[in-house]
Image: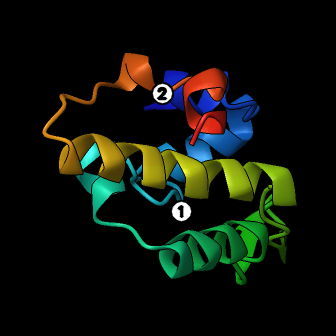
Amino acid sequence: MRAALGRLGFAAEGQAAVANADNGGQGLNTIADVQMMTDFDVESMCTSIRRPGGTIDDGHGNQVPNRGQSISVIQEKKLKLMVYFCKHKKRCSDNCTHDMITEANVAAM
């Protein structure tokens, strides 16, 4: 899933925040996970990534506010289109793989 997010313009930190299940990531790893999401779920996930709350260690043993990761409005829209693309493939009984998630395919939706 990280490669698919990269093709949609997500930096490595954004990919990790969406796909990793550890370190506060959202754990969005499979096409089935994507197909279960709604627009509201995508909005909630992006808000949680942008403003996770709590504190983190700054590397020097000090606790500092967790500022989260930057996800632009355009990237949020691409995530919504990715969800729609994957659901569309399922409705049409087409196979959907991570390799099919490209900016061109998602934008065509």
Q: Residue at x 70, y 44 (%)?
A: 14
Determine the secondary structure under disc 2.
Answer: loop
- Vertical placement of residue 49 versus 101, above or below: below
What amino acid type should be assigned to the residue bearing mark 1? Gly
Q: In this view of the protein, which residue sits in the foreground, 98 or 91?
A: 91
Determine the secondary structure under disc 1.
Answer: loop
Q: Which residue is mark 1?
A: 24
User: Which badge, 2 or 1, comes first in the chain's sequence?
Assistant: 1
The nearer-to-camera label among 2 and 1 is 2
Task: Name the spot of residue 22 as percent of width and height, x first.
Answer: 43, 53
Task: Name the spot of residue 43 as percent of width and height, x first.
Answer: 63, 75
Task: Place residue 86 in its image quadrant.
Answer: top left
Q: In this view of the protein, which residue sits in the foreground, 16 or 78?
A: 78
Q: In this view of the protein, which residue sits in the foreground, 109 or 5?
A: 109
Task: Name the spot of residue 107 as percent of width and height, x first.
Answer: 66, 36
Q: Please state, as top left, top right, bottom left or bottom right, where the C terminus lies in the image.
A: top right
Few, some or many C-alpha atoms within 10 Å of disc 1 (few <14, some 14-19, many ≥20)? some
Q: Residue at x 64, y 23 (%)?
A: 104
Few, some or many C-alpha atoms within 10 Å of disc 2 (few <14, some 14-19, many ≥20)? many
Task: Place residue 108 in its image quadrant.
Answer: top right
Q: Residue at x 45, y 53 (%)?
A: 83
Q: Which residue is mark 2?
A: 101
Task: Name the spot of residue 66 as percent of width and height, x first.
Answer: 79, 71
Q: CA distance from mark 2 to mark 1?
A: 24 Å
